[in-house]
Image (cartoon, rainbow, N blue to C red):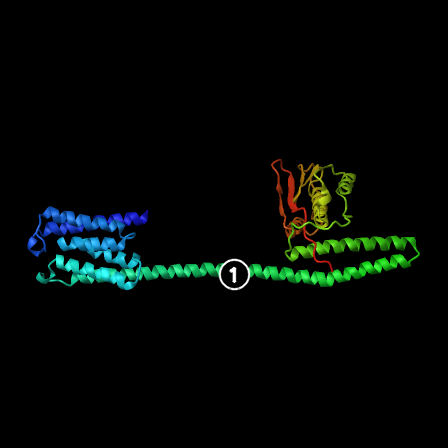
């Protein structure tokens, strides 16, 4: 819109100045072609109108003004060289050839050989052309600098993403090579202890240790697969899942006086062990926060098992009484941040905040499956 306004303003100025000069000096002796004054005014207005298309059609506009200047030297001829060099396409010699034709036409139309100052008009035309070259070069430089800055920003982001990916792979390798090895040794030693001991209590403890180690290996392999960026949509091998049950967790909360309503929709069998463990920890931490920060409130746990995602919401009503200051201050205060990290590592989303009824709600959406890492 601004460009159109500038072009219209230039056309009006060229018409006014050119027409004023014709009215101020109606002597036709200095014109190549004799004609009535109104014809010269019309020529000035027509040449000025060519400035409206100087950006889109700089060459045709300049040649048209040159043709008009043979009849009546148009004041627009002093403005159009800027458009030729600033917006004209093609090689530089083409632009200056058009400007040269315009200059010759203007001088011939003005009968420059019979006037006292034949140099001012060509000088103005030359300066206008050089100004157009400068503006074009500056515009090109700005565009190139902007493009370089955008490329540098894209490269910086790519390098940062690559650095994060490399760090995740390094962490996955460390976990796989060091932690998995140690846990394997623990499982083997627990199994050997269970076989060799004659004490039933020791045998039971060793078996529990062995089972817990096997479960830790399963979850560790899932996490290593996530860190390596493997395909999470691939179906996982079915493995025994002895993760803690949500029903038992809810019963424990009820036993200490927290009213909890559990709603589960769908089938949890297809959910990966790591996801079930994260789901359990999320509900556990959320109910703990309710007991600490909203005593006297009632909680609701809603879980929906889908084919690809698991959605869980833990909400509570407003507190019935003031929380115990000592109990509320217990812990590191990073429970929600830890939950967010666990959920996001698996590729899920996590939100937590107050509800409209002055309660609180924690909501997360987890992938139903995560890939298993290459088994060691």
Q: Is residue 72 visible?
A: no
Residue at 74% of width from left, 54% of height from top? 218
Q: Quadrant of residue 122?
A: bottom left
Q: How many marks?
A: 1
- Pinpoint residue 225: horizontal percent, then vertical percent: 67, 56
Q: Is residue 128 above or below residue 42?
A: below
Q: Is residue 307 above or below residue 222?
A: above
Q: Secondary structure at mark 1?
A: helix
Residue at 31% of width from left, 58% of height from top? 89
Residue at 56% of width from left, 60% of height from top? 160
Q: Nearer the viewer, residue 16 or 270?
A: 270
- Pinpoint residue 144: horizontal percent, then vertical percent: 40, 61
- Pinpoint residue 342: horizontal percent, then vertical percent: 67, 51
Q: State the quadrant of the C terminus.
A: bottom right
Q: Is residue 276 visible?
A: yes
Q: Nearer the viewer, residue 54 or 340?
A: 54
- Pinpoint residue 350: horizontal percent, then vertical percent: 63, 46
For this view, does 191 lie left or right of residue 66? right
Residue at 42% of width from left, 59% of height from top? 146
Residue position for label 1 = 156
For this view, does 262 lie left or right of residue 127? right
Check disc 1: other Cα within 10 Å, few if <14, some if 14-19, many if 20+.
few
């Amino acid at each position: 819109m601004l460009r159109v306004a500038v072009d219209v303003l230039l056309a009006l100025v060229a018409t006014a100045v050119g027409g004023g000069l014709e009215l101020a000096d109606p002597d036709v002796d200095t014109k190549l072609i004799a004609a009535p004054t109104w014809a010269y005014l019309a020529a000035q207005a027509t040449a000025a109108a060519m400035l409206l298309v100087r950006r889109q059609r700089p060459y045709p506009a300049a040649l048209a003004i040159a043709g008009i200047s043979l009849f009546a030297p148009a004041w627009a001829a002093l403005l159009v060289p800027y458009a030729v060099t600033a917006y004209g396409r093609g090689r530089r010699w083409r632009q200056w050839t058009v400007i040269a034709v315009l200059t010759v036409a203007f001088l011939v139309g003005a009968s420059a050989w019979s006037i006292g100052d034949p140099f001012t008009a060509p000088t103005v035309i030359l300066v206008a052309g050089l100004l157009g070259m400068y503006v074009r070069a500056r515009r090109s430089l700005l565009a190139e600098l902007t493009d370089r800055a955008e490329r540098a920003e894209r490269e910086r982001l790519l390098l940062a993403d690559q650095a994060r990916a490399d760090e995740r792979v390094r962490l996955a390798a460390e976990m796989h090579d060091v932690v998995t090895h140690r846990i394997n040794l623990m499982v083997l030693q627990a199994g050997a202890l269970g076989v060799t001991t004659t004490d039933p209590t020791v045998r039971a403890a060793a078996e529990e240790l062995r089972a817990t180690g096997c479960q830790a290996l399963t979850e560790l392999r899932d996490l290593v697969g996530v860190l390596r960026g493997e395909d999470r949509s691939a179906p996982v091998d079915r493995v025994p899942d002895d993760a803690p049950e949500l029903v038992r967790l809810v019963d424990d909360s009820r036993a200490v006086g927290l009213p909890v309503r559990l709603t589960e929709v769908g089938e949890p069998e297809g959910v990966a062990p790591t996801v079930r463990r994260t789901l359990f920890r999320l509900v556990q931490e959320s109910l703990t926060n309710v007991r600490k920060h909203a005593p006297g409130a009632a909680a609701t746990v809603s879980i929906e098992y889908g084919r690809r995602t698991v959605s869980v919401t833990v909400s509570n009503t407003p507190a019935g009484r003031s929380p115990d200051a000592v109990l509320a201050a217990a812990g590191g205060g990073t429970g929600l941040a830890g939950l967010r990290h666990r959920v996001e590592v698996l590729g899920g989303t996590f939100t937590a905040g107050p509800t409209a009824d002055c309660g609180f709600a924690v909501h997360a959406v987890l992938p139903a499956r995560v890939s298993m890492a290459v088994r060691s």
